Amino acid sequence: MTTQLIEQQNSLFVPLTDFAISEAEEMARCHQSIAKRKDVFDKSVALAGLADWLTYDLGLAADVAMGDFYDPLLRDCHDVADLIVQEMLKIECCIVEDGATDFTISPDVYPEMDSRRIAYVVVRLPEDLVELEILGFLPAIALIDRLDRDGDISLSELYAPEDLTFEIRAAAFDLADFGHLEELVKLDIDQQIMLSMICGNLQYAVAMRELTLKTKQEQSGELVDSSPETRDAIAQEQQEKIARVILRRLKAMWQDS
């Protein structure tokens, strides 16, 4: 997986529902100041759209009600806009203005504040509240050793939205299971060799059965009609993308130690 410039054609658009808007209005009324009400309203609508995308497009279990943002006391004290995915992982939602070229991340939601937080998804919320624009995401691990993380982060550093599914799937694996690769990772040997070794581990993991079967709904149609050779190719491509995420995490854990 490589970072890429996120242009308009790379964005994904998710319809916003009347229910999401009415629920956001209700949540906003819990707060006193006009500025806070506007902030809560925008975040609530954005999170609803993000949850719908994760659930219906990526086939993942997403729940806003389990996040800190859903608690009126926590969202009143902290600059947070999170949801829970796959019952245990956190995704933070960052809203940018139309025309913005960068974004910021609040210290309240830095990775060390909660180890379950795995990604920051950047979105645009239009004034007409018709569709949420998902620009891309930044893996939480990319923020850990960043010296300028309290400043502006360019949108060009975002990963493509559709790659978020591999970030989430990779988090299902315990990095301790790859402990035998520590010295090789520290030596920074050929990346393709490392990816092949990690893929070898994935093939024997029980969780891999879920990872290869639960794909996007649009992909599932291809799997039904495709030949075994095509299905194997799709599974192999998914494995390599997941392996790239795991390798990135292993490097962050071991190469600076």
Image (cartoon, rainbow, N blue to C red):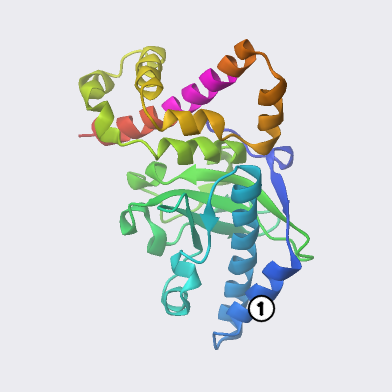
Q: Give whichever of 147, 126 is nearer the camera.
A: 126
The amino acid beneath tag 1 is Glu
Residue drawn where x is 61% and y is 13% of the image: 228
Residue drawn where x is 70% and y is 75% of the image: 22
Q: In the visual, does 255 lie left or right of 162?
A: left
Residue drawn where x is 27% and y is 27% of the image: 178
Residue 197: percent from the left, percent from the top? 35, 16
Q: Is residue 110 visible from the viewing direction of this image? A: yes
Q: Is residue 238 inside the magenta stretch?
A: yes
Residue drawn where x is 44% and y is 29% of the image: 208
- Name the outermost residue toward the bottom: 32
Check the image and report above or below for 75 versus 225. below
Check the image and report above or below for 136 versus 222. below
Q: Is residue 255 visible from the viewing direction of this image? A: no
How packed mark 1 is, by other alpha carbons closer than 10 Å (few <14, some 14-19, many 20 or more), is some
Q: What range is drawn magenta here?
A: 234-244
Check the image and report above or below for 204 versus 128. above
Q: Give whichever of 64, 120 is nearer the camera.
A: 64
Q: In the visual, does 83 lie left or right of 109?
A: right
Count every numbered label the image shows and give the total.
Answer: 1
